[in-house]
Image (cartoon, rainbow, N blue to C red):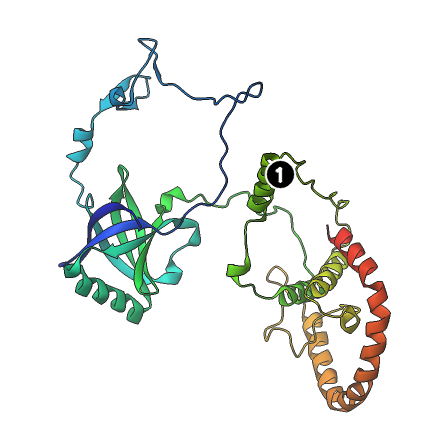
């Protein structure tokens, strides 16, 4: 990988020569601007507004526009002579637990590559110290004309650095959340839990950019002189009037998409109390005493009936499953389509 910056990590009195390389790459498809009548490329030219002529790259410099509109020229010599200790150094200033870093501050990611054999020992020392402490290093560094904040952490056998936004660059979420009082019922939370459990986890390696693949198909079709593929008709949408029905249909559709037999879960009412969270769900931080008592009573009754009903359910399960599978196999397409339309 090509380095974009050379310098050193300052770790107390220890200096570790490193190279900075990009840890990510973009696979998005880019387009050129063209003249629609003849397909000619549209290009931009840089003109000096005082001389009204095109200028070359060698004639272009930097300037700061003052409040009154006047331009103050800034040369590379002016910037290179700044008293900035992080100009060629990633200066570690603290070690903190990883959960202290707000993900909103995360920016670009880089790998820190040891530069030469002398860097191997101190590089390994810092890596192993980070591993054993279960902490991340907070550092300051200068890149592309300005000082930045960074977070160093271990990735495999390498040290990675995430650029961080300065705290004052992250906006407060004012006016984003609903400004009306909303009451969420326990039953709705139970269904939301059921939907989350049904969707489960995902291997991020299995996720891919479907939009990019669709654009590539369009480009391939145009190159071959064929008609580009057409998108399917969108499902009829609308306002969700019944949240409970939408949640039930979402759970049912998610289970069907994962290959589960809907007959086993024909009606989704609430999560069994013995498999729900240890602490009772709360709506907006409040829960009535009567609801808590009802929940405790249900759990006690369910516990006493569990041993008696278990043997009877086991005997019925085998016969009921085959009958339900045959019955629901014919109904599955209709159910699946209906549920997706409602949840849309």
Residue at 35 percent of width and 49 percent of height: 164
**Quarter of the figure with residue 133:** bottom left
Q: Is residue 12 visible?
A: no
- Percent across and percent down for residue 236 are 77, 44
- Percent across and percent down for residue 214 are 60, 44
Q: How many marks?
A: 1
Residue in the foreground of this view, choosing between 182 and 331 = 331
Drawn side of residue 35 relative to residue 54, left or right: right
* Helix, strand or loop for disc 1: helix
Q: Which residue is mark 1?
A: 221
Residue at 31 percent of width and 9 percent of height: 50
- Percent across and percent down for residue 9 are 20, 54
Residue in the foreground of this view, choosing between 229 and 344 = 229
User: 10 Å neighbourhood of mark 1: few (<14), some, or many (≥20)?
Assistant: some
**Quarter of the figure with residue 315:** bottom right
Drawn side of residue 94 relative to residue 199, left or right: left
Residue at 31 percent of width and 8 percent of height: 51
Residue at the extreme top of the image, as rendered: 51
- Percent across and percent down for residue 81 are 15, 34
Drawn side of residue 22 relative to residue 260, left or right: left
Residue at the extreme front of the image, as rendered: 224
> Residue 310, relative to residue 290: is it above or below?
below
> Residue 277, relative to residue 239: is it above or below?
below
Q: Is residue 220 visible?
A: yes
> Residue 16, relative to residue 62: is it above or below?
below
């Amino acid at each position: 990988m090509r380095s974009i910056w050379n310098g050193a990590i300052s770790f107390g009195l220890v200096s570790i020569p490193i190279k900075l390389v990009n840890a990510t790459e973009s696979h998005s498809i880019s387009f050129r601007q063209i003249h629609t009548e003849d397909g000619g490329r549209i290009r931009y030219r840089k003109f000096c507004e005082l001389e009204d002529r095109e200028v070359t790259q060698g004639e272009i410099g930097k300037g700061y526009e003052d409040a009154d509109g006047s331009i103050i020229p800034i040369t590379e010599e002016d910037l290179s002579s700044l008293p900035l200790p992080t100009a060629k150094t990633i200066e570690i200033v603290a070690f903190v637990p990883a959960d202290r870093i707000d993900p909103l501050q995360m920016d670009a990611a880089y790998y820190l590559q040891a530069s030469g054999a002398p860097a191997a020992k101190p590089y390994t020392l810092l890596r192993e110290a980070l591993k054993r402490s279960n902490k991340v290093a907070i550092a300051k560094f200068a890149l592309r004309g300005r000082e930045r904040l960074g977070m160093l952490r271990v990735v495999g056998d390498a040290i990675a650095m995430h650029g961080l936004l300065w705290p004052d660059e992250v906006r407060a979420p004012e006016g984003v959340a609903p400004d009306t009082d909303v009451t969420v019922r326990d039953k709705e939370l139970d269904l939301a839990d059921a939907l989350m459990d049904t969707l489960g986890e995902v291997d991020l390696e299995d996720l891919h950019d479907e939009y990019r693949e669709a654009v590539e198909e369009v480009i391939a079709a145009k190159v071959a002189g064929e008609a580009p593929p057409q998108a399917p008709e969108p499902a009829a949408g609308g306002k969700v009037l019944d949240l409970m029905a939408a949640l039930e249909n979402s759970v049912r559709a998610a289970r069907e998409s994962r290959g589960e037999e809907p007959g086993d879960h024909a009606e989704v009412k609430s999560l069994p109390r013995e498999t729900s969270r240890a602490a009772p769900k709360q709506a907006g931080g409040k829960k009535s005493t009567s609801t808590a008592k009802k929940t405790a009573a249900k759990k006690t009754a369910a516990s006493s009936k569990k041993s008696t009903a278990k043997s009877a359910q086991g005997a019925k399960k085998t016969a009921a499953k085959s009958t339900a599978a045959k019955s629901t196999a014919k109904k599955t397409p209709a159910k699946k389509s209906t549920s997706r339309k409602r949840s849309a």
